[in-house]
Amino acid sequence: MRQARHAPTTSPSPRPGQPVAARSSRAGVGAGVGMAQAWGASRATGVSSANVICFVAMSQERLQEAMRQFRLRQARASNRQEAIQTYCCDELERRGLLGARIEVILPGAYRDKTWDVGRLSASGEVTLGISCKSIISNHGGTVPNRIDDMLGEAVNLHRRWPSAVLGYLFMMAHIDESKDQIKRREARIQAGAFKSIVEDLARKSGDAWFQRLGDSVSRASGRTSAEDFPEKFEATSCSLLDFDLGEPYPVQYHPATPSPDAFFDQLVAIHRERFG
């Protein structure tokens, strides 16, 4: 088990004020949400909107870099999630929350489980846990299972540690990369269908599953206190990445869940409220 947190992943230099996802009109949806949140944050805090927008763009680039590192590793590699886990720890540290580590065993009410990111107090109390999940292939089979899994994870920890702050971070591929789906798309193209039309249909299918995922996840999010339902998470975030459009991967955020940037803001704010 890797107890020590690894060095931050290096990301490309940001372009102030310009979201890197602007390579496609679809990606602009996610960028637009981020810019709107940035503008609202600037008004609420008095910080320059240009500085906040630059921060959002940089945060999005860090997510894209983590996903690029994720894609470089084999699908069954034991450390494939490491770049995403480290990204989470880095984002927490940037907000002043120290002590989070990757691959941490957190003791639950029913069983101990290794969480992607975890934090324990000096006395051994679980104060924070983040589960990172990616859906790259088999959307139809994986989305329902992920929803079931997240409810069980939250109950297991919250039953023993009611004040623990839990987050669920989802990353989903826009186009299903399962071998079966790839073969079907290739067969349609060979039969004379335009590649662009086949890919658009695949993206529409991905949109439908992403909508279902976000809608379900949002209903299991927003836990407000230690007395709230144990199956709920304090915060969740769902991102849709289009790997077929090349790097940097365009990102969209589900409208029912916060962007990853706002997700980490929420986790840290709740953690400070409960643990100081």
Image (cartoon, rainbow, N blue to C red):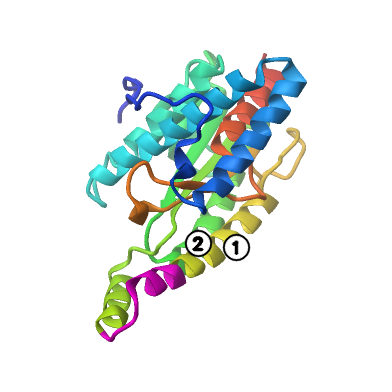
Q: Which residue is mark 2?
A: 143
The residue drawn where x is 31% and y is 82% is 188
- Marks 2 and 1, the one that precedes in the sequence: 2
Q: The disc labelled 1 sits on which kind of residue?
A: Arg
Question: In the rendering, at what x and y percent does residue 253 appear?
Answer: 57, 47
The residue drawn where x is 32% and y is 20% is 7
Question: In the rendering, at what x and y percent does residue 142 appear?
Answer: 45, 63
Can you tell which of label 2 and label 1 is closer to the viewer? Answer: 1
**Majority secondary structure of magenta residues:** helix
The one nearer the camera, 95 or 152, is 95
Proximity of marks 2 and 1: CB atoms separated by less than 8 Å:
yes
Q: Is residue 258 left or right of residue 119?
A: right
Q: Quadrant of the N terminus?
A: top left
Q: Is residue 130 left or right of residue 230?
A: left
Region in magenta: 191-202
Q: Is residue 142 left or right of residue 65?
A: right
Q: Give SS at disc 1.
A: helix
Is 194 contained in the magenta span?
yes
Instruction: Note whether 261 is above or below 92 in the view shown.
Output: below
Question: In the rendering, at what x and y percent does residue 183 appear?
Answer: 27, 75
Q: Give SS at disc 2.
A: helix
The one nearer the camera, 157 or 98, is 98
The residue drawn where x is 62% and y is 27% is 265
